[in-house]
Image (spheres, coloured by chain):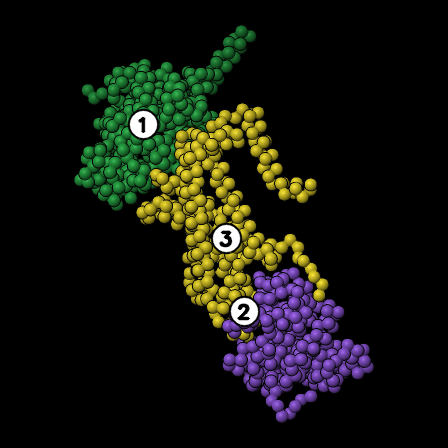
Amino acid sequence: MTLALESPLIELTEVSKHFVSGVRVLSDVSLAVFKKEFVSILGPSGCGKSTILRLAAGLDIVSTGKVQTPALVAKAEGATAFVFQEPTLMPWTSVFNNVWLPLRLQGSGLDQSRARVVAALKSVGLEDFAHAYPAQLSGGMKMRASIARALITEPKILLMDEPFAALDDLSRHRLNDDLLHWQQERSIATLFVTHNIAEAVFLSSRVLVMGARPGRIIHEVTIDEPYPRRPAFRESMRFVDYCRALATALGHATEQPQQTR
Amino acid sequence: MKRILHKLLPALTLLTFLLLWELGVRWANIPAYTLPTPSVIVLSLIDHWPSLALSWWFTIKITLGALFLACLGGVLIASVFSLSPQIERAFFPIAVVLQVTPIVAIAPLMLIYIESTTAALLLCAWIVAFFPILSNTVTGLRATDRNLVELFRLYRASPWQRLVLLRAPAALPYFLTGLKISGGLSLIGAVTAEMVAGSAGRQTGLASRILEASFRTETPKMFAALALLVLTGVIIFLLFNALSRLLLGGWHSSEQSHTVDHNS
Amino acid sequence: MALRIVQSIFLLGLLLSAAHAQQAVTFATNWKAQAAHGGFYQAVADGTYKKYGLDVTIRQGGPQVNNRPLLPARRIDFLMTGNLLHSFDNVKNGIPVVVVAAMFQKDPQALMAHPGQGYENFAALKNAPTALIAKDGQFTWWQWLKMVHGFKDETLKPYNYNLGPFLAQPKAIQQGYSVAEPIYIQEQGKFKPVVHLLADHGFSTYSTLIEARTETVKNNPDLVQRFVDASVIGWVNFMYGDRSAANALMMKDNPEISLAEIEASVVLMKQQGIVDSGEAQTMGIGAMNAARIQDFFNQMVKAGLYQAKDVDLSKVATTQFVNKQLGIDLKKSLAPK
């Protein structure tokens, strides 16, 4: 679980965020993600889950509070990886070039990067589609390419915003299994946003439940199941119990009337 | 068999039209100086080929020259606009003014202000062709996927990298749309300018041949020159369509007839 | 009963003659109303056409207007053209129209230059760096200037009937009507230009010709004769009589022209013998001579504009309606005593 002597790779301390319009998105959020941890954020829409990710990615600034993340460290490009809800691939070029992009932006040429790109494609199972265009891939394959791109810089943290929401159950389960495999292999601290309870339970060591308007963490559940997690876990009683606990917590999150200011 | 027919359909339609034209004029006994038949036009084309060919080449040069300059100007200015919203606000109205000014009115004026007739014609054709490229490219540069922009930010891409690797390819389909529009407009601009303002000596294009034939009441020759103009327009259209297919065929929805689906 | 029949016939006769009295005719010119069209406007304004049983509508031409196709297309009845080259082209291309009268014995087509620039001699004109020539000239008599007088295409710049470029460039020359443009140049540029009539250098065509369809000449020669006659009378009255009504009508049709300009133009027309010179003085205005047409054609063949076999000269013009000494007595009666 958490190794108290190590410092977290992602840390939000009493973070609040409101937009110029005055809408308060986050209120007093604190969380920490350590190396090799897989933390999920569950919550209703509009509760600011994506905003937390963007703050952790350095794409947005806090209004009050502190954020500590490799994304805010100079010269540490590549330490932070982000996977969006859409595959976000460049449609005009090949899968190979898409996966190469982060290295290329760091100044790494084609010859230097070739081996690493091929390896990344292989690890997500797309080695035969290096020269295909994104339009030719299925949804699941596009997501794999997006993950390959995320992993190519050997990031320390991985931020994922409901990446599998658009996929069918079968593809999602397969990708869940693979994701855990890749994440554990590389010991990446992962912050994963989803509204799928079963997914959160299967993947995470901790699940944070958020309430909406303004967004804040109202509950935390620790999933005490060792890694690597087998598909059989999904059918166990423990799994069902965790899901029920989270469902209850989520129900509370949406029930309580909140203030917008 | 069905596929061959499908491919030949445009050609067959054209041939049928020409046949009806030929027979119709003959049957109604319309004199050649009012409406010549296609066969008479072809004969006139062959007869006057030396002078028509030279004029054709001149018109093509003006058209392509103006188009090239329109691309240059359009893309450059669009890039500047995309980098600075203030500059865009300041200068976009001028671009609009250029677009709506009728060439017919300003072509004679251009010839008064500009020494070289060819330069004046180029300018007129450019004015007509430049706006669609500018407008479409500006839209295209703005139309980049927001997530991709964030991704580039995440990896701390330089502005140059962002322009070359992200914005330019994203703008390409839009630019090509503008190009397709401007291709035809450039031809029309070149011809209109010459027709309204005239041109001189050896530097004359098909518009002058049309005028000349009209003044000399040589109607078949007029139609022959017109036919060459139409042909030029069609070739430009087909050329840019092919270019678009070449550059976008692999990936852009506008050029996809179906997507190949693999199983994940 | 018999009385009734007689009355009916009388009424019918009146009706018929009334219908015949005003035959509607459209005559298209080749420019906006100017003194060079004066005779036709005169015949409308003073009722001469009406006297000849014609209700004539004059349809102006202009810088961007080409009325010539309207004649074979039967949209107009008579057409004014500027020179015989158009007629040669018509016959060459099988267009069934024919010249029936020539109102000008001399073509006023001229080249103009700034004074004191060395263009006092016609031969110097071809060396001008800029020759402002309009489209109608560029494709017709400019070719003759190139072939016979050594002018070069490189000097040609399009002339869009705007005096600006000529006024701004002292070394430029431009085309114009000798009885019109010099007046405007004097007004706007405040100098008197050097004027070289093409007619003085071999361009011997008739001008301000009246064209009609060959079918009209064949099927309705009476109509043609009446129109030609009335037009000739109109010209006599315009040149020598009271033209105030004609002037007013022209200024109404073309608001850009002034009375002073019209009158100055008439003076020039008389001075240069445009309308009433040579054969017109003995045979009447509108006179035509087949031999002269032949001679002009030969010159154009020599200049390379045509091949002899292209044009059957017998089809170009017919003299059956002119050379009748019409108007000579009228002119005498109008002369100041």
Tell me which amino acid carries mark 3: Leu
Q: Nearer the viewer, mark 1 or mark 2?
A: 2
In this picture, residue C199 sits left or right of residue A145: left
The residue that label 1 is drawn on is C303
Mark 1: few/some/many CA within 10 Å (<14, 14-19, 20+):
some
For the C terminus of chain A, the quadrant is bottom right
Q: Nearer the viewer, mark 3 or mark 1?
A: 1
Does the image show residue B195?
no
Label 3 is found on which chain of the structure?
Answer: B
- Chain A in the picture: what colour? purple
Label 1 is found on which chain of the structure?
Answer: C
Indicate the chain coloured yellow by its letter: B
- In the image as oriented, which residue stretches furthest toward the top? C2
Q: Is residue B182 above or below residue A227?
A: above
Marks 3/1 in contact by CB < 8 Å: the verdict is no
The residue that label 2 is drawn on is A111
Q: In the depicted view, which residue is nearer to us: B244 or B103?
A: B244
Measured Cα–Cα span from mark 2 to mark 3: 35 Å
Marks 2/3 in contact by CB < 8 Å: the verdict is no
Classify mark 3: helix, strand or loop: helix
Indicate the chain coloured green by its letter: C
Identify the mark at residue B163; answer none if there is no mark. Answer: none
The residue that label 3 is drawn on is B179
Classify mark 1: helix, strand or loop: loop
Expressed as whole percent of the image width and height from the top left, the position of residue C73 reads 47, 27
Q: Is residue A250 above or below residue B192?
A: below
Task: Name the image quarter holding residue C174.
Answer: top left
Expressed as whole percent of the image width and height from the top left, the position of residue A111 reads 54, 69
For the N terminus of chain A, the quadrant is bottom right
Q: In the depicted view, which residue is nearer to us: B122 or C98?
A: B122
